[in-house]
Amino acid sequence: MKILPHVVFVVPPGVHLLDLTGPVQVFYEAAEYGRPYQLTYCSYAGAVSTSSAGLGLGPLVPVEDVQVEAGDFIFVPGVDMEYLRSAAFRQEGSGFFAWLREQYARGIRICSVCTGAFILAEAGLLDGRKCTTHWKRLAELQARYPLVLAQADQLFVQAANLYTSAGITAGIDLALYLLEEAHGPLFATKIARELVVYARRGAGHSQQSIYLDYRSHLNSAVHHVQDWLTDNLAAGATLDTLAELVHMSPRTLTRTFRQATGLTLNEYTTALRQELARTLHRNPALTREAIAAQCGFRNVRQLQRILPKPVTG
């Protein structure tokens, strides 16, 4: 029996609800699209936690009973600052901090949302590492934990198997990024569309993406063509094939696609190939011939024509 990838959500006292439920919903929707995750909710301070808004959450699994394997995720959402500044934070969390360090050493990927970075910092996981948190709390994080390398103006920061994200909705951005890393950009885009959010990407990606742009229209047939092209670039589909896919004439599809996206089908397909080629070029194991084939080209010469020319002089 195949074991599902596991995402553990820690629910500390004073948790901010959206910091918790935003990433939860992302991974929940992944199951709806055929990529299920096992979701577990745990606590280090009793079977029930009360959120910063006064909502009780429980019963929760004790952290010592959580079973995770290398490659799984632990999410630590943001917490009310009054709790993080209290003596109870260090007293109640001392065993949890040691548990977090142990999980990280075992290859578990640990993610924080908003002020959850303070919990990772208290555990010593962020010493000497770049990280981020809500913009209002960056200075306090740096002052309280001088060994961390707090980064401003970042949606999220990855340092090895540690991921820290800025306030509230950046937790959704981070969760979408993790899905993209695991299942590809088209899958993450589908989840973002399901949640009716604009999927902002990480620092390693351009602020613009062909997978995300040209999607603000509501034409389901054009969305279907865009999805099919992204999944089947290597097939090199003809206009007739695409038109048949959505039960339109080639002429109608050509007109409809341009009205919806502002691009011709050829321009859109070329942009998809450029994006995929840039991604595949980061894999040193792939030859140019292999990249060309995956992008739907018959030879490397066709691939070279769409790639940016190197800057000289």
Image: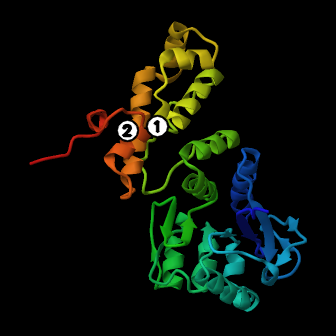
Q: Identify the residue shown where x is 9% and y is 48%.
A: 313
Q: Secondary structure at mark 2?
A: helix
Q: Quadrant of residue 302?
A: top left
Quick check: 281 above or below 256?
Answer: below
Q: Verify CB contact (< 8 Å) between mark 2 and mark 1.
A: yes
Residue receiving disc 2: 274
Q: Secondary structure at mark 1?
A: loop
**Numbered disc in front, either 2 or 1:** 2
Q: Nearer the viewer, residue 97 or 191?
A: 191
Distance from Cα at disc 2 to Cα at disc 1: 9 Å
Any mark on residue 210, and which?
1
Q: Looking at the picture, how far across and down is residue 89, in whole percent? A: 71, 85
Q: How is the image coloured?
A: rainbow
Name the side, left or right, on which 93 lies relative to 252. right
Name which residue type carries label 2: Gln
Q: From where the camera sits, is residue 235 visible?
A: yes
Q: Identify the residue shown where x is 64% and y is 40%.
A: 190
Name which residue type carries label 1: Ile
The 10 Å Cα crowd at callout 1, few under 14, some 14 to 19, many 20 or more, is some
Name the side, left or right, on which 113 lies relative to 18. left
